[in-house]
Image: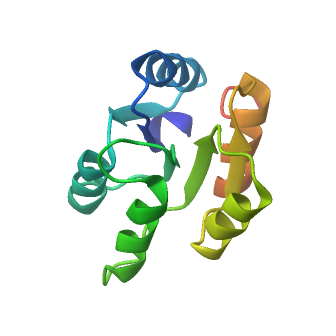
């Protein structure tokens, strides 16, 4: 059930953060947000999330460095989707080498975002009826 699925969205752009949060809440997810890498690391280590949507370019700790730190933790991290404006093949390769499930580019459509989440979770559209 979508209501039971928790997503952490991390982006230093407050407008982007609000739009993604609204999109995911409308789709039935429980959403928490963070505006930087340090806050994201703290939340991920203190709480349980089914998926993390993570920007790369943030002023305190980059999304790449968040992934590196999570990969060093004794507990496996939740699945992470990068959502970023960084479009180089090198950045994509780094992201996948760090273990992200999807590398999505901004701006993103609602459908593309939900598809990536559903693929990551192995679920169908959360607001679809059986």
Q: In the image, residue 5 lies at what x, y percent?
A: 48, 43
- Quarter in which the N terminus is drawn: top right
Q: Residue at x 73, y 64 (%)?
A: 90
- The relative height of residue 59 versus residue 65 in the rendered view (above or below) is above
Colouring used for the render: rainbow
Q: In the image, residue 35 lies at what x, y percent?
A: 33, 34
Residue 70 in sight here: yes
Q: In the image, residue 36 lies at what x, y percent?
A: 32, 41
Camera-nearest residue between 20 and 98: 98
Camera-nearest residue between 111 and 81: 81
Does 11 sit left or right of 75 as displayed?
right
Does 30 sit left or right of 48 as displayed?
right
Q: Residue at x 40, y 52 (%)?
A: 49
Residue 128 in sight here: no
Q: In the image, residue 98 lies at what x, y percent?
A: 57, 72
- Quarter in which the C terminus is drawn: top right
- The relative height of residue 85 versus residue 81 in the rendered view (above or below) is above
Q: Residue at x 67, y 59 (%)?
A: 91
Report the label total.
Answer: 0
Does 88 sit left or right of 66 as displayed?
right
Location of residue 112 by image quarter? top right
- The relative height of residue 24 versus residue 45 in the rendered view (above or below) is above
Q: Residue at x 70, y 25 (%)?
A: 107
- The relative height of residue 92 versus residue 77 in the rendered view (above or below) is above
Camera-nearest residue between 31 and 122: 31
């Amino acid at each position: 059930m979508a209501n039971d699925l928790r997503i952490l969205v991390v982006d230093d752009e407050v407008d982007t953060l609000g739009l993604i949060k609204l999109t995911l809440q409308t789709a039935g997810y429980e959403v928490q947000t963070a505006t930087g890498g340090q806050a994201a690391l703290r939340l991920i280590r203190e709480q349980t999330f089914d998926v993390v949507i993570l920007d790369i370019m943030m002023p305190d700790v980059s999304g790449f460095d968040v992934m590196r730190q999570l990969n060093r933790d004794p507990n496996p991290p939740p699945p992470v989707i990068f959502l970023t404006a960084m479009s180089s093949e090198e950045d994509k390769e780094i992201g996948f080498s760090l273990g992200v499930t999807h590398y999505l580019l901004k701006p993103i459509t609602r459908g593309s975002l939900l598809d990536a989440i559903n693929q990551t979770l192995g679920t169908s559209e959360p607001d679809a009826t059986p």
